[in-house]
Image (spheres, coloured by chain):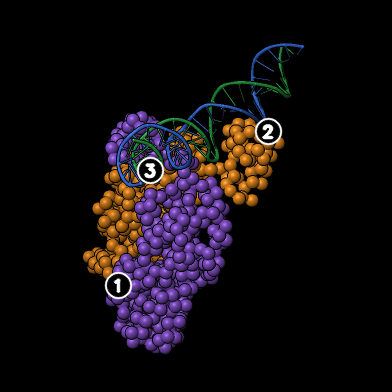
Chain colours: A orange, B purple, C blue, D green
Amino acid sequence: MSGRTVTIAEVAKHAGVAVSTVSYVLSGKRTISADTRRRVLDSISALGYHPNAGARALASKRSNVIALVLPLRAGMHVPVLMRFASAVVTAARRFDHDVLLLTADEGTAGIRRVAASALVDALVLMDVELDDRRVPLLRELPEPSVLIGFPAEPAGLTCVDLDFAAAGAQCVTHLAERGHEEIALLGAPSVVYDRGTGFATRTREGFVDALDDHGLKGVALPCEETFDEVYETVRDLLLDRPGLSGLVVHNEAAVGHVLAALRQLDRRVPHDVAVVAICPDDVADRAGPPLTSVLIPAEEVGREAVRLVMDKLEGRAVPESTLLTPLLVVRAST
Amino acid sequence: MSGRTVTIAEVAKHAGVAVSTVSYVLSGKRTISADTRRRVLDSISALGYHPNAGARALASKRSNVIALVLPLRAGMHVPVLMRFASAVVTAARRFDHDVLLLTADEGTAGIRRVAASALVDALVLMDVELDDRRVPLLRELPEPSVLIGFPAEPAGLTCVDLDFAAAGAQCVTHLAERGHEEIALLGAPSVVYDRGTGFATRTREGFVDALDDHGLKGVALPCEETFDEVYETVRDLLLDRPGLSGLVVHNEAAVGHVLAALRQLDRRVPHDVAVVAICPDDVADRAGPPLTSVLIPAEEVGREAVRLVMDKLEGRAVPESTLLTPLLVVRAST
DNA sequence: GCCGGTCGTCGAAGCGCTTCGACACTCTCA
DNA sequence: TGAGAGTGTCGAAGCGCTTCGACGACCGGC
């Protein structure tokens, strides 16, 4: 067992080989005979050896750590973000990497710091705005990076996300097929649009374009997150548009309030008003009634982001843009 | 500007001093004349020097990284957890440390790995269960650790949390003062109690004990998170206990559903039923109506956890148990 | 039976930093 | 005035690992 910390030299002595041989067994960068490998591996587990991360990073110029930059801004739905984050951590481990968590307090200085100090090999950035302050920095950084989300000018970057425009359009198509003729999109809080967060804007664009394509009447509105504000928004919407019979909700925090408001306004779902949500599956499932929804494939996006960043680390070419196809699941609300 | 990466040797040459002098300027571990310090600092910013994290860790046996172990289990309210996490990151930066994010997939192996490889100097663990598999490991690890939450047997560990028993009691006291005679606690989902998560259990104990102290009638129930289940729970509760006029809700995900259910059952808040929540301030504020609540001081807990872990790293003695006093804020619901 | 080519292993040179002991000064006080 | 006690700085020895070049041993081909 371990008294003190075990070094590669002790493993080498125990196995009766050179230090470099142990290193090559571990990295597989040179061929090693089956017999020697066995002995080394046995010594490693006998002594409980763990390579020292600092020494490894110093010698190899690779820390095997990637940064996850997660600003946690106002109006963002945290459980969704954490799905992405969690998926990134899990995927990174598959590539034998760990994840350093960076929040927004330091601004871009934190990114610069962890990159310049070689604390991390690469970066994954979340909650990307259309005009994101981090983007110019990424362009000049030698470390590879991947964005989850798209800025306004994504050329030269590597971005991955759900195709929110297609998601917005798919909701419209679904409601059109159900025979609805006038519908509305309740989107993110207005602060999120003001900030120019890509996914909110792109959903709205997809929604509006699809209205035209299907010849539907409709409107796209931002939607706040307190019950009272949601109630007012829904009430006014129904007053203004008596013909409205379908609602697309792209706001995880408000979706429960929307359903409560409809109940209070004596509209039955889906009989009087059909509701489609864009949200994670479990949020849709947990609502009353369970909601037809376009799911946000957080696990897949996170996994893909890590795959891309690893490809870049290995010097492989990657596409600038990766858009995942949305999938609409029909439940009780339409 | 930086072409390649700048080393301490280049800084030393540029400033006309020895490498060790630069190091001492940076660490402050030996006295350096004001003049020399100036020159070194100037060279550092002229060259854009950033110490290499790996080299530093190797030489000093300190990585300046702490692990944040965040399992994200079922039934936990993620936005609340992320407040803690975010507070930990911010506080760690104050001490010039970064945060490595560990999730549950690897189980205890991940903890062992990052500790043994000296990737991290210390650990902060969240979402602690009464009988937590990580606890025995922590006891044998040479690296210091702090738990956010309390296991059943916290002796020998360092734990910090809101005093949930006091929080539960404080809600009862508040309702008693308002003249309520029969009340109920709607707590976490039953899976959380089954798992033996400390905070849920301790709130319930504080609640039940306080009922006795104040001579109130009452009951403590788990509470699921879908609207339909919440609705049934609330409806049955009101049927079974016609005299019930106060509700304590300790479940961030259900609190909106509880209010919606009460509306649907034609009970006005606070006129027919008073509601006190135990949740973050903004959740309480955003509800309809805004809720009297005991706030969960996530920022303070996170900050305190980091302070404790830094004290332990410096070899200072720390209390085994740190309980933060709950604070009840009166809003429109009582 | 000798030559070139693999294969498997070794030794040593760093990677960029911290830290220890040494040393030259300058003060202070007997 | 000289011993003793600071100051401020330097040089060198690692920290534990990866990687490069070297070098036997062994192989097949002619």
Please determine if labels 1 and 3 lie on a single subunit.
yes
What residue do we see at 45% from left, 65% from top? Answer: B319
**Residue placed under numbered mark 1 in the picture:** B290
- Please state the horizontal and vertical placement of residue B81, each as a whole percent of the image: 42, 61
Report the chain holding disc 2: A
Between the C-alphas of marks 2 and 1, the distance is: 70 Å
Asked if residue D28 lies left or right of residue C13, the reply is right
**Residue B150 in view of the camera:** yes
Q: From the image, tell me which residue sits under label 2.
A: A33
Identity of the amino acid at label 1?
Answer: Pro
| Rendered location of residue B228, percent (x, y) | 44, 72
Q: Secondary structure at mark 1?
A: loop
Residue found 68% across the figure and 33% down from its top? A33
Same chain, labels 2 and 3? no
- Looking at the picture, tell me which residue is in the foreground, B23 or B32: B32
Q: CA distance from mark 2 to mark 3?
A: 51 Å
Residue B265: percent from the left, percent from the top? 37, 80
Q: Looking at numbered disc 3 in the image, what kind of residue is underneath it? A: Arg
Q: Is residue B333 above or below residue A246?
A: below
Residue type, numbered disc 2: Ser
> Tag 3's secondary structure?
loop
Q: Chain of mark 3?
A: B
Write down the residue under mark 3: B30
User: In front: C16, or A180?
Assistant: C16
Split into 4 quadrants, where in the image is the C terminus of chain A? bottom left
Measure how far apart labels 1 and 3 are at the Cα level.
56 Å
